[in-house]
């Protein structure tokens, strides 16, 4: 995160991988370090569907749930009704694209629409089976930024984007523009159909992190510095902005969640806030609360605050993690008129070894949290190194007045992935790193009900298979996809 490529193993390998893109129009597999460890561990699963949960409502302005963005839906639930691999002779396909494909979405034809961020960031249309590039549109970028300190913890410039209900990619770019890309009729690329120039409302150094529509279609956006929160009327172009902080106080490092009633939830490195649009579409703070903070910028976090995009749960709740030591999973009541805002704060993973930079999974009254403690950039997972293990499930008590830990998995180390829950299989899919010298990376399945590791399959070895904060996405075809530093991988049952 706070370290850059400075040559050596990571820098040299990545330069070679990016150079390979120019060599062919077809997918270039990501090279792996020789002497791989065992390929498959555990046993194939039998699907155990989870059927008794209220569904996440379909956002009217987003692509179907599971296809719209890195966190699957407007609630940022990281939960999908789609099946994923069960571990029956899994196969891995990989492709060097030229940047890390961190947010993966799917159009109505099942094709991949993704932004891949690197020296030359771009929006891509990919074949979901071969991973071949079908079309590409360049995004504004700063090639030098890729080599600066903090490059691998910087989510600005299009790392977050969303696919709307018309198969259009909406990208808030590094140059202060929000562009709407429509697919060409031939399925061979994109055309910019709207270009909203917001440079007049942003100050120097304020760079977009994310943009999403609320349930009424008003576009909200956030910028990393100064806690910028703004709205954009996509029909008139009217823009309104407020600032929650100054400099390092009030940073917004992640995306945000949008509810079913115009509600918007945004976390800074000090607070969680609910917003609603005012009469003229202006951002209005409905409520705000300060969360516990140790003041530490822990290894595994981008800044000294929560590492989570807020996550909405059914029943009127929203959740984040805080920056206490140990870290807590914190649940709040979301209604504007709640008499008591906080429901609970449950510590996870232990003092001196707990943080996360990835959004929680929400499913019914349950939350899944992952430990990322120890990740300071790609070098933290080289030469047999890995991060502190840990997953935990926190459940809200049936009476809604507290929470408890349902289980903990203390064996699997997932340095930075956004994990996903499949309601069709009952499995949590994550991405773990072994401590062998060959640096193996595994696509890993945990049991949602118990937290036990069910199976894990080797995707590859070496720095080219580091996902560096990218999120797993389950496609309409049952394949799991994940961005890695030079491109992406796909895992499916044979």
Image (cartoon, rainbow, N blue to C red):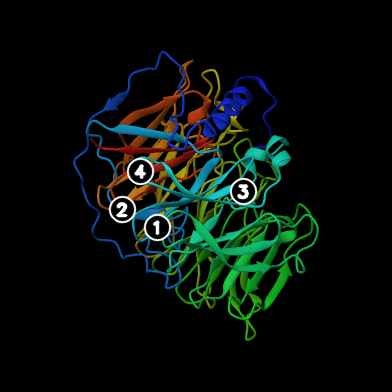
Q: Which mark is residue 186?
A: none
Mark 1 crowd level (few <14, some 14–19, many ≥20, 10 Å Cα): many
Q: Please give left or right for residue 422 compared with residue 370 in the image.
A: left
Q: Which mark is residue 67?
A: 1
The label nearer to you, 2 versus 3, is 2
Q: Earlier in the sequence, mark 4 or mark 3?
A: 3
Could you give the CA–CA distance between mark 4 and mark 2, rounded to whole angstroms? 9 Å
Mark 2 crowd level (few <14, some 14–19, many ≥20, 10 Å Cα): many
Could you give the CA–CA distance between mark 1 and mark 2, rounded to whole angstroms? 8 Å
Q: Which mark is residue 480?
A: 4
Mark 4 crowd level (few <14, some 14–19, many ≥20, 10 Å Cα): many
Query: Residues at badges 1 and 2 in contact (C-beta under 8 Å)?
Result: yes
Q: Please give left or right for residue 115 compared with residue 37 in the image.
A: right
Q: Looking at the picture, how far across and down is residue 303, in whole percent?
A: 67, 45
Farthest residue, direction left: 46
Q: Quadrant of the C terminus?
A: top left
Q: Earlier in the sequence, mark 3 or mark 1?
A: 1
Identify the element where label 2 is drawn: loop
- The residue that mark 2 highlights is 476
Identify the element where label 3 is drawn: loop
Closest to the observer, 139 or 349: 139
Could you give the CA–CA distance between mark 2 and mark 3, rounded to whole angstroms? 26 Å
Q: Which mark is residue 155?
A: 3
Residue plotted at (73% across, 36% down):
148
Could you give the CA–CA distance between mark 1 and mark 4, rounded to whole angstroms? 12 Å
Could you give the CA–CA distance between mark 4 and mark 3, rounded to whole angstroms? 22 Å
Mark 3 crowd level (few <14, some 14–19, many ≥20, 10 Å Cα): many
Closest to the observer, 234 or 71: 234
Q: Looking at the picture, how far across and down is residue 52, in whole percent?
A: 24, 61
């Amino acid at each position: 995160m706070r370290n850059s490529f400075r040559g050596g193993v990571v820098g040299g390998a990545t330069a070679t991988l990016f150079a390979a893109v120019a060599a062919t129009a077809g997918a270039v597999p990501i090279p792996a370090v020789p002497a791989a460890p065992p390929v498959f561990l555990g046993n194939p699963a039998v699907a155990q569907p989870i059927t008794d949960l209220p569904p996440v409502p379909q956002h009217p302005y987003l692509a179907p749930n599971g296809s719209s963005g890195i966190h699957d839906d407007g609630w940022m639930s990281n939960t999908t009704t789609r099946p994923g691999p069960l571990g029956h002779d899994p196969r891995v396909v990989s492709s060097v694209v030229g940047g890390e494909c961190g947010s993966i979405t799917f159009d109505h034809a099942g094709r991949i629409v993704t932004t891949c961020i690197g020296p030359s960031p771009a929006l891509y249309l990919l074949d979901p089976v071969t991973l071949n590039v079908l079309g590409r549109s360049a995004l504004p970028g700063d090639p030098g930024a890729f080599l600066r300190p903090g490059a691998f913890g910087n989510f600005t410039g299009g790392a977050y984007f969303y696919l709307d209900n018309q198969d259009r990619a909406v990208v808030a770019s590094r140059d202060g523009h929000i562009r709407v890309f429509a697919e060409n009729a031939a399925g061979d690329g994109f055309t910019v159909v709207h270009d909203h120039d917001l440079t007049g409302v942003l100050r120097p150094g304020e760079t977009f992190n994310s943009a999403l529509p609320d349930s009424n279609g008003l576009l909200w956006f956030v910028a990393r510095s100064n806690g910028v929160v703004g709205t954009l009327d996509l029909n008139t172009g009217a823009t309104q902005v407020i600032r929650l902080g100054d400099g390092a106080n009030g940073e917004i490092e992640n995306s945000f969640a949008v509810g079913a009633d115009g509600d918007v939830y945004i976390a800074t490195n000090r607070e969680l806030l609910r917003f609603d649009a005012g009469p003229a579409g202006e951002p209005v703070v409905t409520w705000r609360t300060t969360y516990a903070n140790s003041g530490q910028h822990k290894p595994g976090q981008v800044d000294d605050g929560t590492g989570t995009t807020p996550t909405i749960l059914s029943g009127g709740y929203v959740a984040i993690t805080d920056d206490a030591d140990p870290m807590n999973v914190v649940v709040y009541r979301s209604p504007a008129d709640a008499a008591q805002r906080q429901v609970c704060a449950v510590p996870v993973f232990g003092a001196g070894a707990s943080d996360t930079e990835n959004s929680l999974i929400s499913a019914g009254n349950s939350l899944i949290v992952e430990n990322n403690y120890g990740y300071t950039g790609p070098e933290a997972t080289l030469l047999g190194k890995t991060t502190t293990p840990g997953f935990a499930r926190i459940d809200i008590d049936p009476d809604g007045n507290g929470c408890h830990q349902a289980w903990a998995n203390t064996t699997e180390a997932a340095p930075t992935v956004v994990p996903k829950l499949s309601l069709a299989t009952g499995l949590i899919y994550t991405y773990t790193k072994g401590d062998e010298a060959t640096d193996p990376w595994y696509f890993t399945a945990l049991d949602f009900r118990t937290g036990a590791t069910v199976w894990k399959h080797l995707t590859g070895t070496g720095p080219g298979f580091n996902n560096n904060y990218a999120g797993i996405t389950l496609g309409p075809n049952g394949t799991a996809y994940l961005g890695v530093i030079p491109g992406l991988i796909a895992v499916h049952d044979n």
